[in-house]
Image: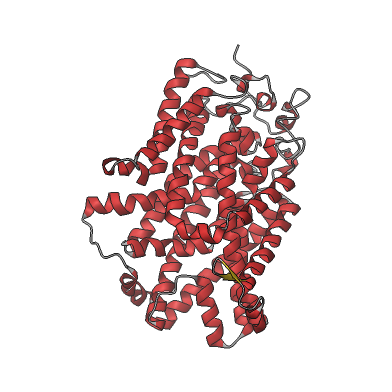
């Protein structure tokens, strides 16, 4: 008999998970949200994406594309299209969060099984830890610069001591910013909502102010864009198809990989949304506008530095430090670096801490809380040496995008195509429910996931198949989606909604 679909009212969600739920699958942080916890409106969701998008990696993203051989509008097109592609799974996964009030680790149990869910959940978590380390390192550089402005002797701390090319001041700044991140983890999700809402308009004003400064300094936006070609460092001129496959496709994949992480765990946020409209429209407004705008600001301001200083200054920390020295105004320097801190903090907390906090909590719900999971993620972010990971930016993005694409293909197919958005909420928290499959693992999902990953990796075997790796997210997602649909239609495992 087909299990009864959950009632439409939000009030039923918390009560649907009751005395039959397992302590190995549920704690207060993983349980469905209550009606009084649905406090995120359209602006809060949009502000979340503004806060995450306005960051130093976004500012420098188009820079990497232009240095590789694109012009300014081609790089912005890749950024916009990448965001448009990834918005699709973001909205689909976000639908489950808003409808059932469940976090990502609970949502993915329907496709991978109650135990198999740990695979995509921990995959997302460890990638987030990598990004957490990168963003925390960047924020630490801003802390280092601020303290250098306030106290010139700061740069002499530790004398000539260095580790991996960085001084004691760099690492102390890193740890100061690390503790700032951990404060918001300890304070919980409501503090994150408050921070993102406050930070969003402030960061947009700072970015537009930087663009206005650059435009006024060099005589207009047209002069800046005309100079942008000077940023291109690639020597090889490619015709259309080689350009598309050798340059545009890898960077489009990297752009999808930039937010492919959130396309998995976006239910961690939309579970607090007031309505489906709020999560859909909020995500579209926040993501599709902010990323291209801030990347454009990065290109424009960097082009202006070529005119003003005779060199391209891509790193905003370096640029603002130079402007501070020229203005001889510590106040200007402090305000500028404060903006960088807020931008990095708002991105780091939302994009890189919430997911691993919930994932690690899902491992042992009765022992690991959201707070403890966040602290574990923070510790891992230190020991991965993020200053080295940042050096392999493109390879990092493309490599993990194949892993996440394979997981997205299974999850989207299961929720959207096979189940039509209908889940049995109670069974998501039961060890002997319909999502237990075989000993907690859905073998079909694992086969489809591995097939997707192997498809992407096949692109590293021969030059003829290189497009599979260059487009790792797309190739992995397409294969895992198709294979999962085919195998599940034949086996009809874990059926809740009719598999027509």
Task: Name the residue rendered at 52%, 69% in the picture.
Answer: 207
In the displayed structure, would residue 107 be above or below residue 201?
above
Picture quadrant of residue 279? top right
Left or right of 21, for residue 102: left
Left or right of 441, for residue 29: right
In the displayed structure, would residue 420 be above or below residue 338?
above
Picture quadrant of residue 494? top right
Q: Nearer the viewer, residue 198 or 52?
A: 52
Q: How far across and down, in percent of the image, does residue 182 sit? A: 71, 56
Q: Which residue is at the far right?
A: 19
Q: How far across and down, in percent of the image, does residue 89 sit? A: 49, 40
In the displayed structure, would residue 191 be above or below residue 167?
above
Q: Which residue is at the far left?
A: 239
Q: Is residue 276 visible?
A: no
Q: Specify the quadrant that holds the N terminus.
A: top right
Q: Nearer the viewer, residue 273 or 132?
A: 132
Task: Name the residue rendered at 42%, 34% in the picture.
Answer: 452
Task: Name the residue rendered at 51%, 57% in the picture.
Answer: 389
- The color scheme shown is secondary structure
Q: How far across and down, in percent of the image, does residue 369 sit? A: 74, 42
Q: Nearer the viewer, residue 149 or 154?
A: 154
Q: Is residue 463 visible?
A: yes
Q: How far across and down, in percent of the image, does residue 211 sit? A: 47, 73
Left or right of 24, for residue 4: left
Q: How many marks?
A: 0
């Amino acid at each position: 008999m087909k299990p009864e679909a959950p009632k439409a009212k939000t009030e039923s969600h918390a009560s649907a998970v009751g005395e039959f739920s397992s302590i190995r699958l549920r704690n207060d942080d993983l349980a469905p949200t209550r009606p009084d916890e649905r406090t995120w409106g359209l602006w809060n969701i949009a502000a979340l994406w503004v806060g995450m998008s306005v960051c130093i990696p976004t500012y420098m993203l188009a820079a990497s594309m232009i240095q590789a051989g694109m012009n300014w509008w081609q790089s912005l097109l890749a950024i916009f299209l990448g965001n448009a592609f990834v918005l699709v799974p973001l909205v689909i996964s976000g639908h489950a969060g808003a409808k059932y009030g469940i976090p990502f680790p609970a949502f993915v149990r329907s496709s991978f099984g109650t135990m198999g869910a740990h695979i995509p959940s921990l995959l997302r978590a460890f990638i987030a830890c990598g990004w957490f380390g990168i963003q925390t390192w960047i924020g630490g550089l801003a802390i280092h610069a601020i303290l250098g402005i306030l106290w010139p002797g700061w740069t002499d701390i530790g004398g000539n001591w260095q580790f991996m090319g960085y001084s004691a001041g760099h690492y102390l700044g890193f740890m100061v910013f690390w503790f700032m991140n951990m404060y918001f983890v300890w304070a919980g999700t409501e503090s994150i909502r408050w921070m993102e809402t406050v930070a969003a308009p402030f960061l947009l004003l700072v970015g537009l102010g930087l663009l206005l400064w650059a435009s006024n300094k060099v005589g207009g936006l047209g002069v800046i864009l005309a100079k942008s070609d000077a940023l291109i460092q690639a020597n090889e001129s490619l015709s259309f198809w080689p350009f598309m496959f050798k340059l545009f496709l890898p960077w489009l994949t990297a752009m999808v990989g930039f937010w492919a992480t959130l396309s998995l765990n976006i239910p961690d946020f939309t579970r607090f949304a007031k309505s489906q409209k709020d999560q859909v429209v909020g995500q579209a407004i926040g993501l599709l506008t902010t990323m291209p705008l801030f990347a454009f600001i990065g290109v424009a301001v960097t082009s202006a530095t070529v005119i003003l200083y005779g060199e391209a200054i891509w790193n905003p920390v370096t640029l603002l430090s130079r402007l501070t020295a020229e203005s001889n105004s510590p106040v200007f320097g402090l305000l500028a670096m404060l903006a960088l801190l807020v931008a990095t903090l708002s991105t780091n907390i939302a994009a890189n801490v919430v997911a691993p906090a919930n994932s690690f909590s899902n491992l042992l719900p009765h022992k690991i809380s959201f707070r403890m999971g966040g602290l574990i993620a923070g510790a891992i972010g230190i020991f991965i040496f993020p200053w080295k990971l940042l050096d392999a930016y493109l390879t990092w993005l493309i490599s993990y995008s194949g892993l996440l694409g394979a997981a997205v293909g299974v999850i989207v197919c299961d929720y959207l195509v096979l189940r039509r958005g209908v889940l049995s909420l109670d069974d998501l928290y039961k060890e002997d429910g319909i999502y237990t499959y075989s000993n907690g693992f859905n073998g079909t999902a694992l086969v489809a996931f591995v097939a997707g990953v192997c498809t992407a990796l096949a692109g590293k075997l021969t030059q003829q198949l290189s497009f599979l790796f260059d487009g790792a997210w797309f190739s992995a997602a397409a294969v895992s989606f198709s294979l999962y649909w085919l195998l599940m239609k034949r086996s009809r495992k874990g059926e809740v909604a009719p598999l027509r």
